[in-house]
Amino acid sequence: MFGKKKLADTSPPKVPSGAVFEQAEKEARKNKLDASTHPEFALYGKHVFTGQVADDYLKQHGSSGAILKEHSWVKNHADVVASAMLEWAIDHGATTFCHWFQPLASSGVRHGQTGQVYNMMLKFNNKTNKVEYDFKGKDLVQGETDGSSFPNGGLRATHTAAGYLAIDTSSPVFLRGDTIFIPSIFVSYYGKALDEKTPLLRANDAMSTHGARFLKHLGMEDAIEHGLKANIGLEQELFLISREQFFRRPDLQFCGRTVMGRVPPRDQEMCDHYMGALSTATPALACMKEIQDECFKMGIPLKTRHREVAPGQFEFAPEYGINTVQIDQNLTVMQVIEEVAAKHGLAALLQEKPFDGINGSGKHNNWSIATGNDIPLFLPGPINKATNNPVAFPIIMAAVVAAIDEHGDLMRMSIASPGNDFRLGAMEAPPAIVSTYLGADMTNYLKAFKDGDSKAYLPDTGSIDIGVKHIPAFNIPSEDRNRTSPFPYGGARFEFRAVGSSQNCSMVNTVRKL
């Protein structure tokens, strides 16, 4: 009835064949080289509703991330997106949503760079005395608040005080703590901009429309179909000092800079802080690592960290991206820097010139333009090929130089702030006078083009051989770095070096489009 007892298998275990073992080894090595499997980076981008994260949640609601590529989703799919976003928020412990905007005059004047209106993703059932999740498309795409004090109460009529918030579909929703933040524009009842982002978005559209028309005249037949986009990369400089010492200085607390006291006997004469080791002997390294970790969760590609020239000065730099996204991310980075620094017993100083006699802090705005299908305009090969026009590149470069010459006053205005005007032309480059530097090769090329010579731009490349046999000669670009010019050409991009470290760069990049 019970059958025969099955004897234990005592045969030796099967050894995988060579091919199977080799395949398994390849898979293991592939996984090892996949950065997303590393514990330090496993959460990268999980707190921003875009890419794979958005696609996974939207598929659970019968849609996909593809709908977010068209701004029309705010009219046609808002409820679906809101439902997916609510589930994403709950999974990460968030119960609040915030329309997150950039008030006028936020840069260098206002306390805090952003305006934030918080609401719970809940409704309160009075019949059952229970709370229920409630977050619909109408809550996501639009909000309203009192706008009478933007930019300040003396400039607004209180009988027309409404302020309206609308989601900016060019920048993804992100999550931090118990809140999802919805990048938004902020306008009055009559559609007047009360923020710094609305002019930027208008400038982006104007640049795309007229720039595409310009490219079509140069020979790019599909220019209007693809349009143009502006890419930027914002390098963030800052000071980290002892929080205990910070609270002993009322001038630093109230003004952001020292206004009294003596200059120390030793400043930055040897520049020995620059690129120095980030030592574990001070809290700075742990602080910077935590800042990067926080930013990685929100999909902010904060790739570089290092010491800067002045004692106690540091820098973060991300990879470049679309200007609206980069500016939103930079505003978030500045908030994260200040909050994380406090956890490590440090105070983060973002003001441009906190100390006399040493370097101040900037926010170099690396700027380029590309077509919607990623053809760069500031490199000769790709744009000349796309237009089938050998003179497209020099015409574009000449237009940029002419714009700097004609609108230099607007460029200067866009970087003016109480802190930055102490910095420019003081202890470090660049000066306060707006100019550009193209390098000898580019300058000679454009001069020749002006005189009727349409030869190709072929910049010289150099080679350095230091005379050591185990270090081969290596190539260098045609031009050295120009740290003096406020707006030098760096190959594929211009670098607006005069921007201040505490600035919201929306106005800076609005002016770039003029």
Image (cartoon, grey):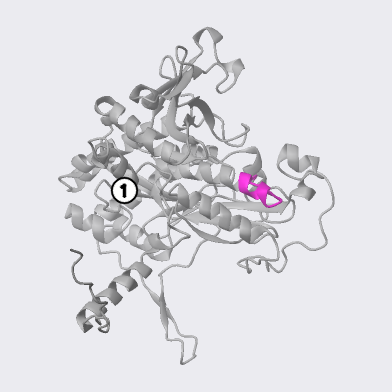
Q: Residue at x 25, y 82 (%)?
A: 15
**Residue at the bottom extreme?**
469
Q: Residue at x 50, y 50 (%)?
A: 295
Element at label 1? helix
Magenta residue check for 343: yes
Q: Residue at x 37, y 41 (%)?
A: 49
Q: Which residue is mark 1?
A: 52
Magenta residue check for 457: no
Q: Residue at x 59, y 53 (%)?
A: 237
The span shown in magenta is 338-351
Q: Where in the figure is residue 260, as x and y percent of width and height?
A: 82, 45
Say if 138 sits above or below 512 in the image: above
Q: Where in the figure is residue 489, as x and y percent of width and height?
A: 43, 57
- Left or right relative to 350: residue 235: left
Q: Quadrant of the N terminus?
A: bottom left
Say if 63 sits above or below 153 in the image: below
Indicate the quadrant where residue 157 lies.
Answer: top right
Q: Where in the figure is residue 194, as x and y percent of width and height?
A: 49, 24
Say if 93 sits above or below 137 in the image: below
Q: Amino acid at mark 1?
A: Gln
